[in-house]
Structure formats: C-alpha cells, structure tokens
Amino acid sequence: MAEPQYADPLLENRREEDAGAVFVLESKGQWWHAGFHLTTAIVGPTILTLPYAFRGLGWGLGFFCLTVMGVVTFYSYYLMSKVLDYCEKAGRRHIRFRELAADVLGSGWMFYLVIFIQTAINTGVGIGAILLAGECLKIMYSDLYPNGSLKLYEFIAVVTVVMIVLSQLPTFHSLRHINLVSLFLSLGYTFLVVGACIYAGSSENAPPRDYSLESSESARVFSAFTSISIIAAIFGNGILPEIHATLAPPATGKMVKGLLMCYTVIFLTFYSAAVSGYWVFGNEASSNILKSLMPDDGPSLAPTWVLGLAVIFILLQLFAIGLVYSQVAYEIMEKRTADVKQGMFSRRNLIPRLFLRTTYVIFCGFFAAMLPFFGDINSVVGAIGFIPLDFILPMLLYNMTYKPSRSSFTYWINMSIIVVFTGAGLIGSFASVRKLVLDAYKFKLFSDDVVD
C-alpha cells in the first residue's frame, strides 16, 4: 500500500504546543467511552423526526432509505476508523478531521473545506439542541400553566445559561459519564414515545390514518429528497476523528467496538420510533412526533405522565448533545488562545476559556431564539454538511489510503456510494433550501413556536 501524502504545514503536528490537542482532545478514553460519545453524537431527539421523514417517502421507500443509510454510515465510519488506524501505525496519529483529510488527500483547500463544513454542522447542532431544549421547557410549562405568559425565547435563554455552565467542562474525555447517562436517556424516551404512539393508535380517539404522498409528481420528488436529507442528518456524525482522538493510544481497533455499541442502540431506537410514529399519524406527522401526541387544539393522545417523562429525558440529553458537538469549536478556539505550558486551570487559560465558550453558547442561543426553524434547518444541515463528511469523504479517504484495485468490489462499492450520495446531496440541498423558502411565510423573528 502506498503511503498517503503528508501535507505537513496543515497537519498542526506540533502537538506538544497545541492546547486544543493537549487540553480539549486529551487521549485517555477506552473503547466504551468512544461508544458513549458516538451514541450521543448520533442517537438524539432528532430520531423523533423520522415519522416526518417517512411521510415524504411512504412505508416501502422509508424503510429502504432508513436501512441503506444505516448500512452505509456504519460502513463509512468503519472505513474511516481503518484509515485512522493505518495512519497511527505509520506514526501519524490524527486527532482532527481536517488533519486527516489534508494528509491523505494532500490538499490545502480540503483542510479548509472540512473546517467550514464541520463549523456549519456543529453550530447548527448547537443551535438545534438549545432550540429543542427550550421547546421542551415550554411544553412542560404550558402543561402546568396553560395560560402562562412566558415565551419560547425566554426558555431558550434559561437553557443557554445552563449550557454556559456545562460548557466549562474542559475536555471531551470529561464528558464520558454525561454521555453514558445520555445513552440511557435516548433508550428511555424512545421507548416512552413508542409506547405513547401505540397507546394513541389503539385508543378510541386515534387520529385518522392517511399514508398517501403529495398529489403532484414534482412535489413528491422534492419531499422525498428532503426526507432523505433529514435521515442523513439523523445518522450524521461529522466528528468521528475527534471522538477517535479521545482514545488512549494505541487506538487501533477500539473505534470499531464503539461503533458496534452505538449501532446496537441505533437499531433499537430508529426503527421503533419511525414505525410507531408513522403508523399512528401518517402524512400528518409533525417534525417532532411529540407535537403530534400533544396537539395544541385538543387533549394529549397518551398519558400525560408518559409524555412528561419523555420530555424530561429529551431535555436532559440535549445538554449532552450540545456539549459533544461544541468540542470542535472549543479546540479550534483554544488552540489559538490557550498556553499549553501553563495548567489547564491556570488563570492564564481559565479566563479566555470562560469568555470564549460563554460567547459561543450565547451566539447559538441567540440564533435559536431568533430562527426557530427546526425541521427545515435539520434537512439543510443533512444535505450540505453530513452527506459530504459521512457519505463521501470516508470512501475517498479509504481509496486513497489503501488503494484497492480498480477492478475490486471494494473500490466500486466506494465509488458508487460517492457518486450516488453526491447526487443525493446536491438534489437534497436544493430541495431542502426550496422548502425553507416555501416555509418563509410562517417565519417570525423570535417566534413563540418552532416552525416544522
């Protein structure tokens, strides 16, 4: 196998002077810690959007796309772990996605493209986590005080303050216990919501079920690609090399075990949430199935205590998700501002960390309050962000690193995935932006409702 090109100026390889590497991405974890991080990065409340994605695809295509995305992403992450292991054995352990892409592809522009895409993903997820957490608080408040005067942006402000406090945890590795709890929370609220859907669908007040798609062919096509983008975003994890960085060296083989843990949880949660929600609400499923279970114009369709407990679990997990995806932003900031020669908790490093992380969280909170477009933003982030990083680059990196024969099955599978998902990403981007524009009439700055 030929050695990958080594773009030394872009690899930031002076790790002993790199505070982002030494502090934020310290390498102390075991494979199960990586499993906790991966699960938190992938299995979140966005799975409650799956019935909404199915309404643009129908039963057959919905199952097909969900399964294909699952298989392809597992394969993609497996290939990336192989590339990371290969580079580590060659004496070049990569702890950042941008470093890996620049090394293997030998390209300066790829280094900056990955930074741009990761920043868009991480900021989008950060905004979405704060927005959904604020919505969870508002749901609980509205249930207790139906005529209460507090608005969505006020709950977003409360969530932002909590996130500011939690953001001061200094390293990715320090989140391992939080992410273990996050794993159990994801299982908990999924099964509560599935139970609520079964209860709602079996009750006398079960909503009428209609699984028909859009009436016009063009609308069906756009809806389908928007749904594909949403599913891609739900499976997306644009920070696998950074999670790999948290593993204590040698890291070879450990990420695969973490992936197996993560995808076991994915199998249990994704299919059950998608099937139960779409079964009950069909093409009336909202972008958050909890909103369908708790309609504004009538009583809840399932026991209040079940839905309330699910909302609490979701709220708690959203803090963990926001923390995980903010780590790339923190390591970028602290690489430039922290002094590795002084202690992690020295005044020299503590004050800039407090200021910069607080500013970043406030920025995310402000945009969450100002632009409550969850469903549409989710699909745009999937098409523009997650598809390139999770469905295209890993295949390219593997082919460039291991150089399989052009007549081999592996080479053509990888190239086929690259071509198919490049096309899906381009069409999905157009379809997602189109839907965002069509929904613009619903938009109000600092709206009190999350727009589907």
Image: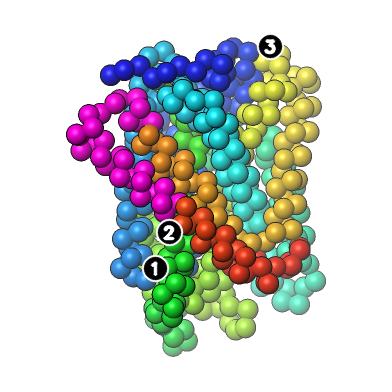
Residue 165 shows in this picture? no
Q: Which mark is residue 22?
A: none
Q: Main secondary structure of the magenta part?
A: helix
The answer to whether residue 212 is above or below residue 154 is below
Residue 279 occupies quadrant: bottom left
Residue 3 shows in this picture? yes
Q: x and y percent of residue 325 in the render? A: 58, 41
Q: Name the N-terminal-most of marks 1 and 3.
A: 1
| Side of 94 relative to 155 (left or right) | left
Q: Nearer the viewer, residue 21 or 442?
A: 442
The residue segment tinted magenta is 397-425
Q: x and y percent of residue 141 in the render? A: 70, 67
Identified at 43% across, 80% down, the residue is 215
Q: Amino acid at mark 2?
A: Ile
Identified at 40% across, 56% down, the residue is 269
Q: Which mark is residue 228?
A: 2
Kind of element beneath mark 1: loop
In 3D space, how far apart are the residues under numbered discs 2 and 1 (Cα atoms)?
A: 8 Å
Residue of label 1: 57
Q: Are marks 2 and 1 in contact (CB under 8 Å)?
A: yes
In 3D space, how far apart are the residues under numbered discs 3 and 2 (Cα atoms)?
A: 47 Å
Q: Nearer the viewer, residue 427 or 375?
A: 427
| Side of 108 relative to 141 (left or right) | left
Q: Amino acid at mark 1?
A: Leu
Kind of element beneath mark 3: loop
Q: In front: mark 3 or mark 2?
A: 2
Label 1 neighbour load within 10 Å: few <14, some 14-19, many 20+: many
Q: Which mark is residue 341?
A: 3
Q: Is residue 400 magenta?
A: yes
Label 3 neighbour load within 10 Å: few <14, some 14-19, many 20+: few
Q: Name the N-terminal-most of marks 3 and 2.
A: 2
Kind of element beneath mark 2: helix
